[in-house]
Amino acid sequence: MTTADANTFKILIATDNHLGYLERDPIRGQDSFNTFEEILQIAESNQVDFILLGGDLFHHNRPSRSCLYKTMRLLRKYCFGERESKVWIASDQGVNFGDELGVANYLDANVNISMPVFSIHGNHDDPSGTNNLCALHLLSLAGMVNYFGNSPSFEEVMVQPILMEKGSTKLALYGLGNIREERLHRQWQANKVKFVRPADEGWKNCFNLFVLHQNRAAHGPKSHIPVDFLDGFLDLVLWGHEHECRIHPEEYERFAITQPGSSVATSLSQGEAEPKHVGILKIEGSQFNLEKVRLKTIRPFQFTTVQLSRVETLSQSNVKGIQTYLEGVVEDLIERAKIEWEEQINMSGPEPIMDMPIPLIRVRVDYSGGYETFNPKLFGQKFINRVANPNDMLKFQKSSVPRMLKPSEMLSDLSRAIPERLDTFKVEALVNEMLSRDLFILPEPGLEEAVISLVDKSDKEAIRSFVFKSVTQTRESVPVIPEELNIDFVKRKSSEKKEQMNAMYASSGRVPPTLERQGDTTNDNHNNLSFDEPTQPKRISTDNSQELSQKRRRVLPTLGSSSRNRMQ
């Protein structure tokens, strides 16, 4: 190892691996695992100090046994070994990791780890249910992943740093797992999101890296985290949750943002069709450099938009002609996928040639102007074994979407195709409308959370658990039952208890763990926010320092917190 290597952190950064996505699909079931293995191979070949993941390691809140087995097999294969780490942790690991072990796995004498993995949770694999646990807790207890960034409170969000040293370079790694967008936005505005800074003078000029998993694009006034919220002392922000790959560091006034994007396409949107990368991040002193590495096992994905009114040879009622035209569009996209795959293989050098996987195809069809639609699934039968998603290649939509309709009115709009109607609103908007009339016992915010948890996370126990808990709390709030029990008495007592629970939701922002719902990564039109043209990242300078050769653990005191304060 050279002197420069002894002082340089080398970190592989990735996010949104969504292991287990469509795992039962005979064609796409192994995609997430294949690419995750490639990511581990890239980390191994580059001899990185550790892997840093930005959330949503798993696609499901409760991964299947098969998914957990495959994940643990890959982690054992690539992350276990005898290679000694040169990275010290100087902070209190019991605070950093918050589990019974209270130590990073590579510093645990009972486990041999050659390549540590550090990860926060995302909106798909966040803690829930009994004891508020998630799959990352299991991997952490098994010594396979270092799970951090899980805030124990939503009222006062304290972001504790993992203080790391390698040679003369000091790194403060901050992490914050996903919290529901509106709640975190509100807490940040109220100055209740605080970053704890190290008190020791030796850490005054450390490199500050922050990883989070929230909406970056503004889906609504409070449904994202504005860049202005982030503290000015930060040097680099690793942004998870957004699936479009924008890994090149984008410079802002006081820090840079890198957005690696997902490693598997979970929505057939234009942003997911862009080439996907992971990054090799090098940090030395106060400087950093990020090298992007294109992923080669990604299933080819071609996306285009067709406006039928602009095709002169098509008439509104000629359904067969429209189908024939769209068949030609799909054929062109399949051919384009082959050409791009060959170009990628040629750029890879003398590595073994990999056969091209069956591509994903998405054609967004604008049928405004009175054009007839047809069944996309029947259309896709002609491309079975040639396209990975034959049932949903086509997406019909109109360019002029009424903005003021209620969700139920959009759902009942017979002038629009059924899939298009379902895509014009979010499930929470429909739930809000349906719950506009007061319920007697169940608090509306909690029921909304339960329905969303069922729809977005396939949590089949969410509604049952919520109803049981709400009814139990209401029953316990009535200490004495009158002899002549009537419906008015039940309504009055139920309403009183429901008001108390609604007040609790509103004041503390807390909901039962089973009902916690975070974010949205399935929108076909997300990631529309534009940013300034990124500038070049800071370059690394090299200092000489004595090489560190053994594992150590030191605890430093921490200073008061910093919240949204810009360093002068």
Image: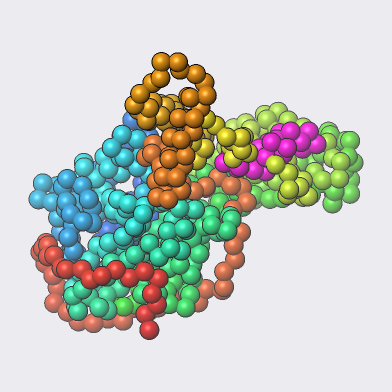
* Magenta-colored segment: predominant secondary structure: helix
- Image coords of residue 248 (percent x, y): 47, 67
Is residue 45 toward the left or the right of residue 364 in the image? left
Extreme residue in the top direction: 483
Q: Compare residues 467 and 118 and report the one nearer the observer.
A: 467
Q: Is residue 523 within the magenta segment?
A: no
Q: Compare residues 86 and 486 and report the one nearer the observer.
A: 486
- Image coords of residue 253 (percent x, y): 47, 78
> Toward which corner of the image does residue 234 lie, by quadrant?
bottom left
Q: Residue at 42% across / 27% down in the picture? A: 471
Task: Identify whether 249 is placed above or below 180.
Answer: below
Task: Identify whether 368 is placed above or below 493.
Answer: below
Task: Identify whether 322 is placed above or below 152.
Answer: above
Q: Which quadrant would the N terminus be assigned to in this image?
A: bottom left
Q: Residue at 61% across / 59% down in the picture? A: 528
Is residue 239 toward the left or the right of residue 93 in the image? right
Q: Residue at 42% across / 58% down in the picture? A: 187
> Toward which corner of the image does residue 20 lie, by quadrant?
top left
Q: Compare residues 122 and 59 and report the one nearer the observer.
A: 122
- Image coords of residue 103 (percent x, y): 16, 53
Q: Which quadrant would the C terminus be assigned to in this image?
A: bottom left
Q: Is residue 202 visible in this depiction of the protein?
A: yes
Is residue 123 toward the left or the right of residue 287 in the image? right
- Image coords of residue 310 (percent x, y): 84, 51
Q: Is residue 422 within the magenta segment?
A: yes
Q: Residue at 43% across / 35% down in the picture? A: 497
Task: Identify whether 420 is placed above or below 64.
Answer: below
* Magenta region: 407-430
Q: Is residue 359 visible in this depiction of the protein?
A: no
Extreme residue in the front direction: 483
